[in-house]
Amino acid sequence: MPRIVRALSLFLILLGVSGLGLSLTAQEGGKRATFLELKGAVTPTTANYLEREISAASVRGDELVVIEIDTPGGLVTSMQSIVQSILASETPVVTYVGPQGARSASAGLYIMYAAHVSAMAPATNTGSATPIELGGGGGRSPFEQPQEPDDGGEADAVDDGEAAPEEAQPAERPADISNEASLRGKVIEDAVAYIKGLAELRGRNAEWAEKAVRPPSASITASEALELGVIEIIAEDRTDLLRQLDGRTVKTIAGEKTLSTKGLRIVEVRPTRLEQILAFFADPNVAAILLSLGTLGITVELWNPGSIFPGTFGVICLLLAFYSFQVLPENGLFLAVMGLGVVLLILEAFVSSAGIAGIAGMALLSVGLYYLFPESFRVSISLIIGIVAVMGSVLVLLLWQLIKSRAHGPLIGKEAIRGRTGRVEEWQGAEGWVIVDGERWRAKAKQPLQPGDAIKVVEVDGLVLIIKKATARQGFRLPQRAPEA
């Protein structure tokens, strides 16, 4: 019985200690600020990371979540996923464009408008949120103002209430506004309505948001954003941000909440290792390098069939490059231009074009790389120069090897032995036996020869060599005999 009492007492003590620990943990978790990062392109990987951590912060009951932003934009679907997770968060979400020199363009602006509080560091900027068409596109946007007809004023409205002449016809739809441009117009209208809805929800400047979406898209600095009501705070750093957030009341899906940031425990939650690797491959410069290495590997494999390693390496690089294209807004037209450049590079191995096909292929590859992604995602010019230099060097090396392989002439047949040198082994009159490249041949000559004379093959008549005596210029040298003992 005493043992049972002691065991029960020990159990109750442990239960009480664990309960106290859980209580302290919950209390500590309630005074926590989770800092997340949005660096680089907005991709599905980025969206998964932010959605997961925002949801986890709500479950823990964190005081707030801060997303530090430095992005050129990204995919609309990924941006919408992040926005939806912010709108559904019971924990206040604060976006902070920082550190100084950072930007929040395109998709980043929508995320800022969705946040409960939006802040920027000095020397940062935001805007340029016009949707970018994947795969290129042409046609004038229907939101551009059409030019007035230059017909001397005949198209002007009739003054003094006079009726228009019967011949006047309704203005025709401009020919350059194609179905593609109309579709682009619908996309822009949808984007405008989306960001205006976010602006109305958070009480931010909806008029400027529309200007940032419609072409030509507007961009502003941090001070201008504060003045226009796009953001609420300009903060020098994280400490200054938390100080200015203290006491602010925000409205979340769970109701109004007053922020208390004094003594908050700051916890940085970074993406997982896999997410960091996938984010690395979503960089336009990395995509360009992978595409170039893949092209180079496949080309070398086709020039040297059976090498195995260049082809395998090239296929792996191309697969990784294709993943990058899935999360980056590439232009399909210039992707096709790059494909044509690759075809010309491969063609150089099989067609004697004196390097013209190879040079044209590298030129098309360079142009395609530069215009493959929109301006905010553009590949570095210095990187393109480096890629072209490396591929050009490899091309020159392979062409040099090809020229050398053709320069030594045929290795078998009559053409291979014509012009070779040798020595006379036996000779009588106009015929005899000679040694050429270690082989014994029957030979004929128009001049008398002696055993040991140097000879050169002039022609091949069946299995008989037509020879002549080699001159000193031809430089055949007899092997030296070892001295007798």
Image (cartoon, rainbow, N blue to C red):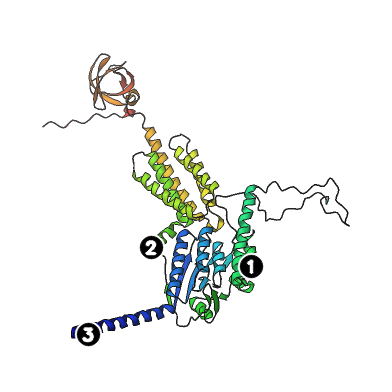
Locate residue 305 relative to residue 42 in the image: left or right: left
* SS category of the residue bearing label 2: helix
Q: Report the residue at 53% width, 82% height from top.
A: 247
Q: Earlier in the sequence, mark 1 or mark 3?
A: 3
Can residue 75 be seen at all in this image of the molecule?
Answer: no
- Name which residue type carries label 1: Ala
* SS category of the residue bearing label 3: helix
Locate residue 157 relative to residue 176 in the image: left or right: right
* Structural crowding at the residue carrying mark 1, measured as other residues with C-alpha within 10 Å and reported as few (<14), some (14–19) or many (≥20): many
Q: Are marks 3 and 2 in contact (CB under 8 Å)?
A: no
Give the position of the C terminus as an image quadrant: top left
Q: Earlier in the sequence, mark 1 or mark 2?
A: 1
- Closer-to-camera residue (4/303): 4
Q: Is residue 4 above or below residue 327?
A: below
Separation (CA) of disc 3 from disc 2: 50 Å
Depth check, mark 3 against mark 2: the one in front is 3
- Name which residue type carries label 3: Val
* Structural crowding at the residue carrying mark 2, measured as other residues with C-alpha within 10 Å and reported as few (<14), some (14–19) or many (≥20): few
Residue position marked by numbered label 1 in the rendering: 206
- Closer-to-camera residue (113/406): 113
Q: Report the residue at 84% width, 45% height from top.
A: 167
Residue position marked by numbered label 3 in the rendering: 5
Separation (CA) of disc 1 from disc 3: 69 Å
Provide residue 360's location: percent of width, then percent of height.
51, 42
Residue 273: mark: 2
* Image-quadrant location for residue 429: top left
